């Protein structure tokens, strides 16, 4: 059988994109482990169920509606209007790979957006309300913003915004959507005292959190290089390099900055420093030098520590630091392109134009994400309620939302009335709330 060079190139690109799509989808395992590790044991199964919801209801929403809004025929630069259920005219996308391969890759991105929010609302949001939010997020909220940047004819696309793999479209969107969700939902019971000081509701398994981080870091090699949509594009090596350096630099400054600030290297900040570096480099990974990538990641690793402290002060209770990592890290990354891009960046003689475009772009996406998520959560709160009862929160969402716990001894211990001290049941099952809180 004779195969032309074009067919061979298309085949290689298709395999590359499908492989990268699998890596991005595997990032959901990273989110599941990371978030489960950061929260208390009595809610750890519930958060994994929420991430699984992103991959089920979220994936179906993106197939039915989201992909069409994001990549369909453009309507006034704002939204797509074809391609729902992967039907209709999609020739305008002009790809070298089959539409199904492109769809699978983009669907994996949509899952990531929803999973960013899942961590921020952990330990107190109703599972039924989360299902509805996930569907709305992947079928409408995220695709509209994505169309602006990546859709053919999107208004930010036409302005020349650079957001290669989604510091704005994915990370800033997810981060500021998380802030809106947290503000409507309210903090976890016992998180803040009357004087405004914060209590530590300790992570139940940092080993799981680190495993999730390593999986996410690994998956980012699909997230960023895969956005080239071509296995024959030699820039994928450069993209992988800048991605890796930013992660390493973010993790390093997260360690060093907390050693200086707290006197000890904080494991959670080391994790979030690396993830913030990854979120930040995602916009400019193909446009900046390796040295600039390290600087961008290093700055992100410091910003995330300061941001976590700030959101705690304003009582925006985010158990995993999603707002700081993705909202602040992603926003910084978009702006950094306007500073560090080797072609058009302010620090490389390109003037201020690209920085202005980047600022306008991330501002527009962030306002849309925050405003629409806030509206959705307010409506869900009024219609069906979004928060479990205080008693259900106290007992744990695993048991009350799913009828099972991740660790059976938590339930048996509570039923037998054993362990009336925090040392026996650090997650607080069956214990007075005051015994479950460590003050920072």
Image (spheres, rainbow, N blue to C red):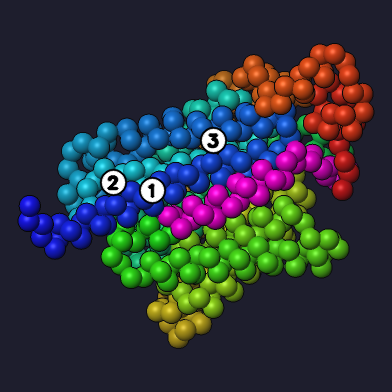
Identity of the residue drawn at 40% across and 61% down: 225
In percent of width and height, residue 157 lies at 34, 61
Task: Determine crowd level at label 3: few under 14, some 14-19, many 20+ residues with C-alpha closer than 10 A.
Answer: many
Mark 3 vs mark 2, CA separation in Å: 23 Å
Q: Which residues are magenta?
A: 195-223
Decide if residue 382 is in sight here: no
In percent of width and height, residue 240 lies at 45, 65
Question: Is 160 on the left-hand or right-hand side of 260?
Answer: left
Mark 3 vs mark 1, CA separation in Å: 17 Å
Badge 2 element = helix
Identity of the residue drawn at 33% across and 35% down: 63
Mark 1 vs mark 2, CA separation in Å: 8 Å
The answer to whether residue 371 is above or below residue 47 is: below
Which label was assigned to residue 36?
none
Q: Magenta span has 69?
A: no
The answer to whether residue 283 is above or below residue 432 is: below
Q: Which residue is at the front of the view, 81 or 101?
A: 101
* Mark 1 and mark 2 residues within 8 Å of each other at the beta carbon: yes
Task: Determine crowd level at label 1: few under 14, some 14-19, many 20+ residues with C-alpha closer than 10 A.
Answer: many
Instruction: Give the residue number, with chain letter if any, for mark 2.
Output: 101
Identity of the residue drawn at 53% across and 41% down: 29
Please tell me which of labels 1 and 2 falls first in the chain.
1
Please tell me which of labels 3 and 2 falls first in the chain.
3
Please tell me which of labels 3 and 1 falls first in the chain.
1
In percent of width and height, residue 337 lies at 48, 70
Question: Is 70 on the left-hand or right-hand side of 134?
Answer: left
Instruction: Give the residue number, with chain letter if any, for mark 1.
Output: 21
| Total marks in image | 3
Instruction: Give the residue number, with chain letter if any, for mark 3.
Output: 51
Decide if residue 289 is in sight here: yes
Task: Determine crowd level at label 2: few under 14, some 14-19, many 20+ residues with C-alpha closer than 10 A.
Answer: some
Badge 1 element = helix
């Amino acid at each position: 059988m004779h195969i032309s060079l074009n067919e061979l190139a298309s085949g290689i690109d298709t395999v590359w994109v499908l492989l990268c799509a699998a890596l991005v989808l595997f990032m959901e395992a990273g989110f599941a482990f990371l978030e489960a590790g950061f929260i208390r044991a009595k809610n750890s199964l519930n958060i994994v169920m929420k991430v699984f919801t992103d991959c089920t209801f979220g994936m179906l929403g993106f197939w039915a509606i989201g992909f069409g809004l994001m990549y369909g025929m453009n309507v006034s630069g704002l939204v797509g209007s074809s391609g729902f259920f992967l039907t209709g005219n999609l020739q305008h996308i002009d790809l070298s790979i089959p539409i199904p391969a492109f769809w699978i890759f983009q669907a994996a991105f949509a899952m990531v957006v929803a999973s960013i929010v899942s961590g921020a609302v952990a330990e107190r949001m109703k599972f039924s309300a989360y299902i509805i939010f996930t569907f709305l997020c992947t079928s409408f909220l995220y695709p509209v913003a994505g169309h602006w940047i990546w859709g053919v004819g999107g208004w930010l696309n036409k302005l020349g915004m650079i957001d290669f793999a989604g510091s704005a479209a994915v990370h800033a969107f997810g981060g500021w959507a998380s802030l809106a969700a947290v503000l409507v939902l309210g903090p976890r019971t016992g998180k803040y005292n009357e004087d405004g000081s914060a209590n530590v509701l300790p992570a139940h398994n940092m080993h799981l959190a680190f495993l999730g981080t390593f999986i996410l870091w690994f998956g980012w090699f699909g997230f960023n290089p895969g956005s080239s949509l071509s296995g024959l594009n030699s820039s994928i090596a450069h993209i992988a390099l800048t991605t890796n350096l930013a992660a390493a630099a973010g993790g390093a400054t997260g360690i060093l900055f907390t050693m200086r600030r707290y006197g000890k290297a904080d494991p959670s900040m080391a994790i979030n420093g690396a993830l913030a570096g990854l979120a930040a480099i995602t916009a400019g990974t193909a446009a900046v030098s390796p040295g600039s990538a390290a600087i961008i990641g290093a700055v992100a690793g410091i910003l995330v520590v300061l941001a976590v402290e700030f959101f705690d002060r304003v009582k925006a209770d985010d158990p995993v630091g999603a707002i700081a990592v993705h909202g602040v890290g992603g926003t910084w990354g978009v702006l950094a392109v306007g500073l560090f891009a080797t072609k058009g960046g302010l620090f490389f003689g390109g003037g201020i134009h690209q920085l202005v475009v980047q600022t306008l772009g991330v501002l527009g996406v962030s306002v849309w994400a925050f405003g629409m998520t806030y509206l959705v959560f307010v409506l869900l709160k009024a219609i069906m309620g979004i928060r479990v009862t205080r008693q259900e929160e106290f007992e744990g969402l695993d048991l009350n939302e799913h009828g099972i716990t991740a660790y059976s001894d938590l339930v048996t211990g509570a039923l037998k009335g054993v362990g009336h001290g925090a040392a026996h049941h650090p997650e607080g099952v069956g214990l007075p709330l005051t015994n479950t809180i460590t003050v920072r």
